[in-house]
Every structure is written in structure tokens, then in C-alpha cells.
Image: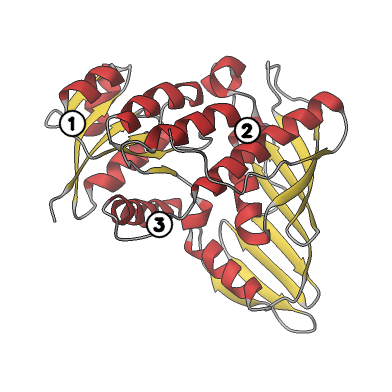
Amino acid sequence: MKDLRVAVIGLGKAGRLHFETRSRQPGVQAVAVCDLRADQAISVAGPAVRHFQDAEQLLEEIKLDAISLCTPTSTHHPIGEIALSQGLSVLCEMPATPNFRLTEELIRAAHPSGARFQLASQFRNLGKVRLAKDLMDEGAIGEIMHFQIELSRQADMSTHWLAQPAISGGGALIDQGSHAFDLVRFLFGGIKHVESSRLQPVQKLKVEDRAMSFVTAGRNVRGQIVTSWSMRPASDFFLTAHGAKGTLALGWKASFVKRNGEDPVHIFNECAMDEAYRRMMGEFREYVQRKSDPWMTEEDTLALSGTVDAPYRSLTSGRPVTVETFERKTAAA
């Protein structure tokens, strides 16, 4: 089968990782890149790969099979819709769009051409997360009682597009919360209720730089999610799940399972996101070539988008909100 011809649009941190991973991937040719900064495109891709400053021009001039869409959130819908309508498959960085309505439109755009749309769900493609799901499904720590997730970092966001609500759709809640809520859905089931609140801001931004969310998921599993751009993580573990028979902890440096009354059992070393991207790129190629199923179905993508809308409704109302379910296919256009 011929190589998959791919372009990477947007060359920030995620876009660079997409390009570097694709450049080393068997069966794939990274044939073009696009970024408003011409020097960035040349720096990342080198002079041998065609580079553009306008995504529409790239899509008009280059013969492609798929794109990696790594631009600011507000541009995912217009660029993705053009690509999908041309029959190009899209691997899109999270979140899909700023809100559910636009996400539904984007997914619908793929139907007439049969193109594939996938979110770049890092955690679903991380080996230690998949192992954790298997262990919990097998009952390694018993019935899940409670979980904690913290995705925090310290970064000056004053000039970053993520802190501009018209471009990003929100602050730390939509940026890191998209990944946190997807992790909850993958491990514990659909989210039913969310109650979110802003923590005392550290940075003077138009969006929230810190937030805490309490969620109910799956079979009434309760958990807490902390997302922040302005504080260091409280521990090395981004996820801790407490079960009736023990605890499972996933960390950036190490992960373990500890059954009640027993010593901890080490299950993983350092968490390397480049591993997740290698797995993701390989599975996306197989999916585009109709050799495998998606790691996120259309229903998953819609449900996640609706879930990410929920904490903002909670922030506005000051009350817990019920998350609507989207367990359905969007109607074909």
C-alpha cells in the first residue's frame, strides 16, 4: 500500500511533535507544513519540505491523504471542515473546537467524503494508561471508590493565545481539562455531573488560570480534578484511583499498584509522551487506511465536547450541572 501523504498545520509544541514523529514513521510521508511564522516552518521541517503560511493554500496545492491539525482551537473548525470536505482525514489536537455545536459540525463534515476525524487523545494512547484500565477492569484494586487527577504547570500565559478566550474558548479548564475529562471517561465511564469553581487566580488573565472540578462518572464514581497554569503539581502522580482493595497511582516518573496490606508493585517507569504520539500516529495511519477501529468514536468525541462545556456552565451558575449524553451518531449530511 502506498505511503500516507500528510501535512502538519500549526508548528507550536504539539505541531513540532507531530512533524518529528511523522517524519520517522514508516509508511508515512510528511510532505508539507504550515505556520504563520515562515522561519518556524523552515526551522522545524527544513528546506526540503514544502512550507506555507496559509492553510487554505496548502490544501489547494498539495496532494494529501491527511493532516495533523495543531493550530489554535478557534481555527480547528474552519480548517478541519475544508480538509474533511476534500476527503482528507484529520488528526486534531484537543480540544476539537471551542464548543459542542462546532464539534458536531466538524464531525458531520467528514460524512459525505468518508474522511476520518480523530482527536489526538494523548492519555488514551499512553501505555501506562491502557495498562491501568486493564488492571482496574480486571479488579486489581476492587470497585473504584474515588479518584484524583491533577494536570498543573507553572507558565506565564499573559501573551499566549490560550489565554485569549475568543481563540481558545476558555482557560485551564478547556486546555488541560479536555485531557483530564477524557482520561476520566476512558477509565471510569461517562461523566454525569460536574461542579467547577475558580481557584484564587495567580495571573491576571481574561480566563481562569486555576480551577477545581468535582465529577461523578460511570457507576457513580466520584472524583476531583485540578487544572492549573499557575502552580506546581502537589505530587508526582497525575492520577490516583482508590478502590475497595487498594490504590493505583500513575505518575510522570513512576507508577504503582498497592493492594491493601501489601507492598506497592511498580508497574511503569517515566511517563514519556513521545511514546503516546508514536502509538497514536501508527494507529491513525491504520485507521485512515481502514485497517483498524478508532480509539475515539464519534460519540466519544461529541460526549467529550459536551463534557468540557459543562464546567463552564457550572462556573456561570455557581451550581453543579448535569452533563448531557450524546450516545448517538450525528446525522449524515
Vertical comparison of 228 with 185: above or below? above
- Asked which colour scheme the image uses, the reply is secondary structure
User: What residue is rendered at 50% in x and 61% in y?
Assistant: 270
Mark 1 is on which residue type?
Gly
Judge left or right: residue 287 versus residue 230.
left
Furthest residue in direction right, as rendered:
319
**Mark 3 near mark 2, Cβ–Cβ under 8 Å?**
no
Distance (Cα) linking label 3 and label 2: 24 Å
Task: Inspect the image, locate mark 2, and give the three-letter code of the amino acid beneath it.
Answer: Ile
Picture quadrant where residue 48 is located: top left
In the rendered view of the protein, which quadrant contains the N terminus?
A: bottom left
Residue in the foreground of this view, choosing between 31 and 229: 31
Residue 252 sits above or below residue 320 on the image: below
Residue 22 x/y as whole percent: 27, 46
Q: Earlier in the sequence, mark 1 or mark 3?
A: 1
Do callouts 1 and 2 mark residues in contact (Cβ within 8 Å)?
no
Q: Real-space Cα distance between discs 1 and 2?
A: 33 Å
Residue visible at 79% across and 80% down in the picture: 260
Expressed as whole percent of the image width and height from the top left, the position of residue 282 reads 31, 56
Give the image quarter of residue 13: top left
Q: Which type of secondary structure does the marked residue at label 3 adopt?
A: helix
* Residue topped by disc 2: 174
Q: Which of the pair 189/205 is nearer the observer?
A: 189
Q: Please, what is the three-letter code of the amino acid marked with disc 3?
A: Glu
Q: Quickly name the residue at label 3.
A: 275
Real-space CA distance between mark 1 and mark 3, rounded to the nearest whole angstrom: 24 Å
Q: Is residue 98 visible?
A: no
Residue on which the image places disc 1: 46
Q: Is residue 75 left or right of residue 208?
A: left
> Residue 21 location in percent, x, y?
30, 47
Mark 1 vs mark 2: in front: 2
Residue 304 appears in the figure = yes
